[in-house]
Amino acid sequence: KAGVTQTPRYLIKTRGQQVTLSCSPISGHRSVSWYQQTPGQGLQFLFEYFSETQRNKGNFPGRFSGRQFSNSRSEMNVSTLELGDSALYLCASSWTIKTYNEQFFGPGTRLTVL
Amino acid sequence: GEDVEQSLFLSVREGDSSVINCTYTDSSSTYLYWYKQEPGAGLQLLTYIFSNMDMKQDQRLTVLLNKKDKHLSLRIADTQTGDSAIYFCAESYTGTASKLTFGTGTRLQVTL
């Protein structure tokens, strides 16, 4: 069974640009969550999607957005990039959202903003 | 509020036991987790415990939960060099089980 895949693995952008990151969950998983990991702020929850609907959102500005497609694949978009957006972006998939079930994390996309 | 704290660094000798500690402030946490992150990799779930449990053992891993003090610990028996990584505790709540609040992470260094 293939794991969670994220593309691209590495990305370099300049301030003001926008970026789109992609996450393909494990087959059969319907929930996708996104996290930002930085040395200063640690791991922070961005948002969660289930059945194409955003179910939870973290405390991030509106420049951060996402969506989920009918095949459960998810994308997140960051517009008007700032230096502070440089981070490792992790996505995780799980079968459901309400009760405990293991979340499987992808290897992440490392975004560098110059 | 949500606030999960861990010590930053722990160094142990190979073969010894490691104990990584975590404190949290939200008593309504339902699930508590330990994740491992190796360099350049994502997060790997090691083990989890429900908030109505005190202890859980899984091979070399033992999780202890003290709800009164809001303290969670992970004990790794017979620590190996392959255990060198960053360890994160995390919590989530009923109804939003997929939304994890992570601790600051503890870097475990295993020396020969």
Image: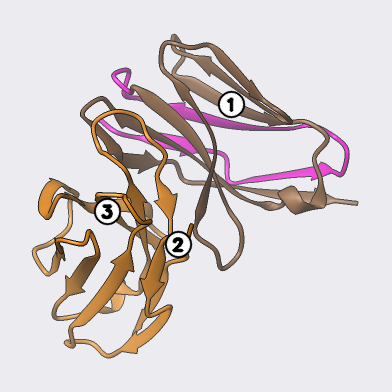
Chain colours: A orange, B brown
In which chain is the residue bearing label 2? A
Instruction: Residue at 43%, 28% (x, y): give it.
Output: B32
The amino acid on which the numbered mark 1 sits, given as a three-letter code, is: Ser
Which residues fall within the magenta stretch?
B1-29
Residue under label 1, please give it: B73
Q: Do callouts 2 and 3 mark residues in contact (Cβ within 8 Å)?
A: no
Q: From the viewer's perspective, is residue A63 above or below residue A111?
A: above
Instruction: Residue at 47%, 65% (x, y): give it.
Output: A107
The amino acid on which the numbered mark 2 sits, given as a three-letter code, is: Pro
Mark 3 vs mark 1, CA separation in Å: 28 Å
Q: Where does residue A51 sit, x and y in percent of width and height?
A: 14, 50
Q: Secondary structure at mark 3?
A: strand
The amino acid on which the numbered mark 3 sits, given as a three-letter code, is: Val
> Nearer the observer, disc 3 or disc 1?
3
Residue under label 2, please give it: A39
> Nearer the observer, disc 2 or disc 1?
1
Q: Secondary structure at mark 2?
A: loop
Mark 2 or mark 3, earlier in chain = 3
Q: Secondary structure at mark 1?
A: strand
Q: Where does residue B11 sit, x and y in percent of width and height?
A: 76, 45
**Which of the pair B61/B2 is nearer the observer?**
B61
View extreme (right): residue: B112
Residue B71 visible (yes or no): yes
Residue under label 3, please give it: A32
Mark 2 vs mark 1, CA separation in Å: 23 Å
Q: Is residue A57 magenta?
A: no
Say which quadrant the N terminus of chain B sits in: top left
Residue A114 visible (yes or no): no
**Which of the pair A15/A66 is nearer the observer?**
A66
